[in-house]
Image (cartoon, rainbow, N blue to C red):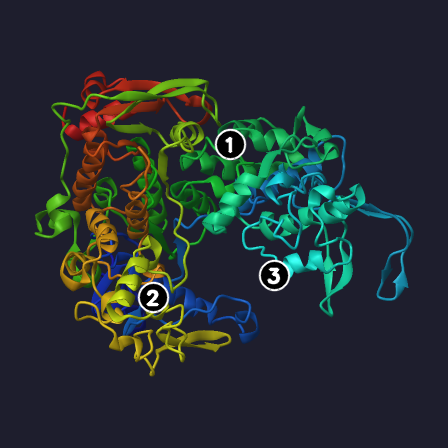
């Protein structure tokens, strides 16, 4: 019987139950969606396609998945909801037939130094239990093997509930005391913190933002421990100790009680307890300059105490096990024969086998989760779902093939089909034709991006899509061809003895003045070679996959820096201050503080955002909107799409060369449809990456490194990207691209292929040469797939 088939012998109640075979969406208006109506079959694999910014994520994540999660949250009590994220109802008229949605997205996993692949999955916890049962000598419970549990021994009288317990008790964890479970220690160079020729009153402290009149510096000058008018080089040893290393002590500063502590401790608490990537650029530069991170000498980077490392199973400690490649660890677990923990071994072995099955067997459990790429993070999140007995669940994936070599995409496709065949609904936002082709149902959004998108332009089978006249249908069978001639290099960038992660003393010459593509299967060592041995050199500009950090007040104008010349142009044309034309400064509407909307917090209910009645959502004071440039006020400029702004700032009264140059770059990377004031929080992954690329193109570097620039790009947009890469090379730049897309490989002047496999099976250069030579040789996995792609 096919899905949805009825028989007249069924009772009416059962016929009604069987009618819920679709997820029905009617009148979806989230972000750029234009009253979208769509019906998605359950227990099928549906792929959502369309150009970047066409509304795919708005429909799948912000409407369907968001409403499912909101409804599930409402099943909990108000007390429990108070501790959960509040979700608003999406802008949609009807959502019917929803099931529980599980999101498997590309958002980075925890960036805490203590978050690892082992802690992010069940594997680490299961391994700790195993060692607590079998390891010799026995040192305690599973906590004894955890680097996140502090080590502590104590003796005395413990009082619980007013009653004294016996003397002598201990709580033992596995955390290394020297590095506190971080695996690395930081040393601060005092010379980068102060100028010893000056006094505190004269500004001796050189830390960014710490001014002599500021509260932090005042706590030093008013503490009574130091002479504020005495040069630091003239301090006695006692004064220097008080300045740098004194333990916290209560003092009064200008009549207010506060805590004084040494400068080194203050710097550690202010800067080193935060993820470095979240710091502002000038603060990050200071940390890079003042702080050196080295492997902890006590635990040798294992994060664990010597006692924990001394407890072993067959000569293997838990630190040794976590450092193993997961595929090797899985084999070791299968070799253990202990009936008392048989169920534990089965569960742990199954989890580790899932890593291998999903193509992550080259990772190790002690790998920091913050170092995983978006694709690796997404596949790691899949681990817990592969063995789940749940059915009739909706799994939502965001480009699951990101970061995958063509050789690995088939494996991912098999996993998606496996989830579907267990009776689940699988929704996938995807651009790769290899995954589109396995879909049971395709929903194509468009026809364009931004305001030109937000409509369903096609629904149906893959064959019907191929015959349709949509952008996706026309480009579904696109195939690039190898260039008949390639550019000649102008020099080489030498890499010698590269041994980061799995690299095996790699020596390679990266040609300059050409387009070079570095490829290989996931985990073969591409990123290790480029980011470990090339990025960071003088003149090298890196555009990675890191997320753009910004609030809902951030937009393309503020992020790219074009707002400053625009504000100055408005100020010059009207004879007023530039600050008036910033929604975050003097020109902001006093009612909404420049946000354009009023946010009302409803506690456990989702907050409500209503347009500001004072400024009508324009964000500026009415008096500011009276000032014009080229006949437009500042709010109208923020509402302009990039393509219109390019012409506006090109000539005439509004001519602003600095802003026009930025706008040209935004148009070059395919973001011409974005408005200058669109919040960064509403941009798709592909849009954010191209915005970052447009910003970095303004750099003075001579070598550009791009990490998978086709991520989030529609088939039709790849050709535009190739044109951009050509323009960069033709302008005298050297471009190095880490990429899996065959069209980019075919367009390269030079290819460096790593492999032959992943993890300890990779880390070697298996091919260097032109794409034509790689296709002709077919000597590597990449060569085979590229040859099939170009039809050779």
The one of 182 and 231 positioned closer to us in this rendering: 231
Residue 427 pos. (x, y %):
31, 54
The one of 437 and 717 positioned closer to us in this rendering: 717
**CB-based contact (under 8 Å), mark 2 and mark 3:** no
Placement of 716 over or under 608, stated as above or below: above
Disc 1: which residue: 326
Tag 3, which secondary structure? loop
Q: Could you classify mark 1 by the number of other residues whose Cα lies within 10 Å: few (under 14), some (14-19), or many (20 or more)?
A: many
Task: Give me the residue at 68% from left, 49% from top.
Answer: 263
Number of the label disc, if any, that sits on residue 213? 3
Residue 677 in view, yes or no:
no
Q: Is residue 199 left or right of residue 519?
A: right
The one of 407 and 273 positioned closer to us in this rendering: 273
Q: How many marks?
A: 3
Residue 257 in view, yes or no:
yes
Disc 2: which residue: 578
């Amino acid at each position: 019987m096919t899905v949805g088939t009825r028989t007249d012998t069924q009772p009416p109640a059962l016929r009604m139950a069987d009618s819920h075979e679709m997820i029905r969406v009617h009148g979806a208006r989230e972000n750029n969606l234009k009253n979208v109506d769509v019906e998605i079959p359950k227990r099928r694999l549906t792929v959502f396609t369309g150009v970047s910014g066409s509304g795919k994520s708005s429909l799948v994540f912000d409407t369907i998945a968001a409403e499912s999660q909101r409804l599930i949250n409402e099943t909990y009590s108000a007390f429990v909801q108070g501790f959960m994220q509040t979700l608003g109802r999406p802008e949609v008229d009807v959502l019917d037939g929803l099931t529980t949605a599980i999101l498997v997205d590309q958002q980075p996993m925890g960036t805490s130094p203590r978050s690892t692949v082992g802690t992010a999955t069940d594997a680490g916890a299961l391994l700790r239990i195993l060692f607590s049962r079998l390891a010799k000598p026995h040192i305690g419970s599973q906590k004894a093997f955890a680097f996140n549990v502090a080590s502590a021994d104590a003796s005395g009288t413990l009082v619980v509930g007013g009653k004294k317990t016996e003397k002598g008790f201990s709580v033992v964890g596995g955390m290394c005391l020297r590095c506190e479970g971080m695996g690395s220690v930081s040393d601060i160079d005092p010379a980068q913190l102060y100028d010893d020729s000056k006094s505190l009153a004269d500004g001796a402290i050189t830390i960014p933002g710490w001014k002599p009149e500021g509260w932090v510096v005042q706590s030093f000058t008013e503490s009574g421990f130091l002479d504020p008018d005495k040069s630091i080089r003239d301090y006695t040893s006692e004064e220097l100790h008080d300045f740098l290393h004194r333990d916290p002590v209560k003092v009064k500063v200008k009549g207010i009680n506060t805590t004084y502590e040494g400068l080194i401790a203050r710097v550690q608490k202010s800067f080193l307890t935060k993820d470095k990537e979240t710091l502002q650029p000038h603060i990050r530069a200071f940390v890079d300059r003042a702080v050196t991170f080295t492997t902890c000498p006590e635990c040798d980077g294992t994060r664990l105490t010597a006692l924990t490392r001394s407890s072993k199973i067959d000569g293997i400690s838990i630190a040794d096990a976590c450092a193993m490649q997961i595929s090797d660890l899985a084999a070791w677990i299968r070799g253990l024969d202990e009936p008392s923990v048989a169920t534990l071994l089965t569960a742990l072995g199954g989890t580790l086998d899932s890593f291998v099955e999903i193509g992550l067997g080259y990772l190790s459990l002690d790998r920091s989760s913050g170092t995983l790429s978006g694709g690796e993070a997404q596949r790691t999140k899949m681990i817990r779902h592969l063995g789940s007995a749940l059915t009739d669940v909706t799994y939502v994936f965001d480009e699951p093939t990101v970061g995958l070599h063509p050789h690995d995409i088939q494996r991912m496709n098999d996993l998606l089909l496996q989830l579907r065949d267990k009776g689940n609904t699988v929704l996938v936002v995807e651009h790769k034709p290899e995954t589109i082709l396995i879909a049971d149902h395709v929903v194509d959004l468009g026809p364009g991006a931004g305001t030109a998108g937000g409509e369903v332009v096609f629904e149906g089978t893959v064959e019907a899509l191929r015959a349709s006249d949509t952008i996706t249908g026309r480009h579904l069978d696109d195939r690039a061809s190898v260039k008949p001639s390639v550019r000649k290099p102008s020099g080489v960038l030498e890499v010698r003895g590269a041994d980061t992660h799995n690299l095996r003393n790699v020596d390679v010459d990266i040609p300059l003045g050409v387009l070079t593509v570095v490829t290989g299967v996931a985990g073969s060592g591409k990123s290790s070679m480029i980011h470990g041995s090339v990025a960071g050199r003088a003149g090298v500009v890196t555009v990675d996959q890191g997320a753009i950090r910004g609030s809902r007040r951030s937009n393309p104008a503020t992020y790219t820096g074009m707002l400053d010349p625009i504000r100055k142009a408005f100020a010059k044309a009207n004879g007023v201050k530039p600050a008036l034309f910033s929604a975050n400064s003097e020109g902001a509407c006093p009612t909404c503080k420049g946000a354009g909307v009023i946010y009302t917090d409803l506690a456990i209910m989702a907050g409500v955002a209503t347009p500001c009645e004072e400024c009508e959502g324009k964000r500026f004071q009415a008096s500011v909107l009276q000032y014009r440039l080229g006949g437009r006020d500042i709010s109208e400029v923020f509402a302009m799409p990039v393509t219109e702004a390019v012409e506006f700032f090109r000539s005439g009264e509004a001519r602003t060369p600095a802003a026009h140059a930025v706008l040209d770059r935004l148009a070059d990377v395919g973001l011409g449809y974005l408005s200058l004031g669109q919040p960064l929080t509403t941009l798709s992954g592909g849009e954010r990456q191209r915005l970052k690329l447009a910003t970095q193109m303004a750099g003075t570097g001579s070598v550009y490194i791009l990490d998978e620039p086709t991520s989030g790009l529609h088939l039709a947009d790849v050709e535009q990207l190739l044109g951009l890469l050509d323009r960069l090379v033709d302008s005298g730049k050297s471009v190095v691209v880490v990429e899996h897309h065959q069209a980019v490989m075919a367009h390269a002047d030079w290819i460096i292929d790593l492999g032959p496999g992943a993890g300890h099976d990779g880390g070697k250069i298996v091919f260097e040469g032109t794409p034509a030579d790689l296709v002709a040789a077919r000597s590597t996995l990449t060569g085979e797939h590229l040859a099939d792609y170009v039809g050779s």
